[in-house]
Amino acid sequence: MTSIFIKTFGCSHNVADSEELAYYLSNFGYTILGLENVTSHLSSSQSEYELELLKQADLIIYNTCTVKNPSDDKFFTLLKRTNKPVVLAGCIPQSQVADEWLKDYSAIGVDNLDLIVEVVEGTLKGDVVHRLKKRKSLDDRELPIIRRNSFVAIIPILQGCLGSCTYCKTKQARGHLKSYPKETIIKQIRKAKHEGVKEIWLVSEDNGAYGKDIDSSLPDLLRNISYTVLNSDIMVRVGMLNPEYAFEYKIELAEIIKQDCFYKFLHIPIQCANDSVLKDMNRPYTTSQFKESFSYLREKIPDITLATDIICGFPTESPEQFLDTLNYVKEEKFTVINISKFYPRPKTPAARMKLLPTHEVKRRSKELSDWFSGVNFNEPYVGQTLSVLFTEKGNVDGSFIGKTNNYRNVIVKSKKDILGMRFNVKIHSTTRDDLRGEIVN
C-alpha cells in the first residue's frame, strides 16, 4: 500500500483541512502517516519519529501557513531537503499561484480538497498537477474527516473573511467570506456526537463573520449548536472572532457562553491598543469598543478566559503608541497572548510602508514577551477543586491533559486511561500556561 505523510503547519483550520485530506486518501486505499502530529509547529529540524515516518512515505503533503515570514523561510528550507514526490496544500500555494517556483510542484487549493486523490495519483506518475481554482461558494456537502484525536472534532464554519487588514496575506489564500450552511455544520456536530466526541472546536479565519453572506449570524449558529448538544457531555469552543464582532455581539455572546455546553473562553485578537495604528492596520474597530466588550464579558462571566494577539513594531507604530498597547495588556490581564513581531508580507499594503529598524521591532517584542513570561494568572486556582474534561495524553508517560470549564489546561497523572472522561481535580501548583493537580474522585 502506498503511504502518504501529511505535515501540517499553522492554525486549527489547517488541521481540519488535513483531516479532510486524510479521509479522501484513506478512503481510496492510501496509508496515512503523521496525522496525529498535525498540530506540530513548523521546524527545519525534525524529530526522530517524524524522520522515520518520512522514510516510510512514498509521497509527502505539506499543508502550509503563510502568516509570518519565518514560517515561509522554514517551509522552503524543508522543501529543498525533500527528495520524494511532494504535494503542496494550504495557504502558500493558494496565495502564490502565479509564482514561478510553484510550477515545479503539484498543489491543491483550499477550496479543492475533494480533488486530492486526483492530484496525488498524477504526482505519483511523475506529473505536476495543479488544482487551485477558487469556488464562489461552499456547497452543503458533509465534510468528511479522519480525526487526529477521536475525542475532538475540529469543524470549519467558514472560509475567508470580510476584512482587508493591511498586514495580512491570509485573505489572498482563503479569499472573501464563504460561510458553510448552518445545516451542514449541525450535521457534522450530530455525527461527532454519535461518534463519542467530547470536545468541538469551531474554526475559521474569523468566526465572528459567520453568516454575513448567507443571512445568518454567529449567535444564531451558536444557539442552534446549543440545542444540538443539549443534555450531552460535549463541550464547545467558540474560538477566534475579531473585536468588531465581539463588540457587535457582546450581549448575545455572554448569554450563550454562560450555558454549560460552552467553554467560558474567547480568542479576540486586538493586535494593538492605539486607534491611530489600528486605522493604519485597517482594523475596523476602536480601542474603546474592545475595552467595552471585554468589560461587559468579564462582568457577565467573571471566570471567562480571554486570549488575544499582539503585533509589535507595525511600521507606523511610535514608541509611545507601543506603550499604549503594553500598558493596556498589563491592565486587561489576558491569560493567553500570541505575540508577533511585524513582518512585511509580500503583496500587502503594509509591505510598502517604511519599516521600523529590525532591532526596535525585536526590542518591543522582547519587552512584551519578558513581561508576559513573568506573570502567572493561574495562581489563584491553587487549592481549588475543579471539574476537568480530559482529551489528550501528556508528553510524560502516564500524564493526561484536560480542560477546565473556562479552558485552562490541567495536567494530572493516572495509572489508567482517562481520555474522554471528566473528573474533579484538586490543584496543587500552577505555571503561566497550566494547572497541575490530582484526581480526587
Image (cartoon, rainbow, N blue to C red):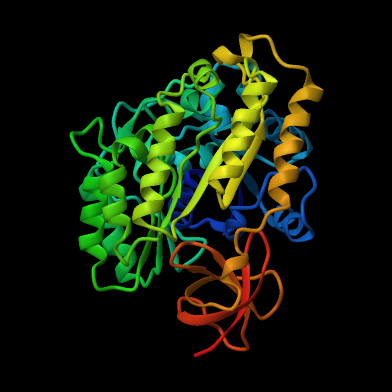
Where 326 sits versus 283, above or below?
below
Q: Tell me how many marks there are.
A: 0
Q: Where is residue 388 in the image (x, y as percent from the top left)?
A: 48, 74
- Which image quarter: residue 174? top left
| 381 relative position to 299: left or right | right
Residue 160 visible in rendering: no
Q: Where is residue 345 in the image (x, y as percent from the top left)?
A: 62, 21
Q: Residue at x 29, y 41 (%)?
A: 249
Residue sitting at the far left: 215
Tell which of 300 and 385 is nearer to you.
Answer: 300
Q: Where is residue 314 in the image (x, y as percent from the top left)?
A: 63, 21
| 271 relative position to 138: left or right | right
Q: Residue at x 63, y 66 (%)?
A: 379
- Which image quarter: residue 292? top left
Q: Residue at x 42, y 30 (%)?
A: 288
Q: Where is residue 205 in the image (x, y as percent from the top left)?
A: 44, 37
| 252 relative position to 326: left or right | left
Tell which of 74 and 415 is nearer to you.
Answer: 415
Q: In which quarter of the image is the N terminus?
A: bottom right
Residue 403 visible in rendering: yes
- Which image quarter: residue 123? top right
Where 252 sits versus 47, above or below?
above
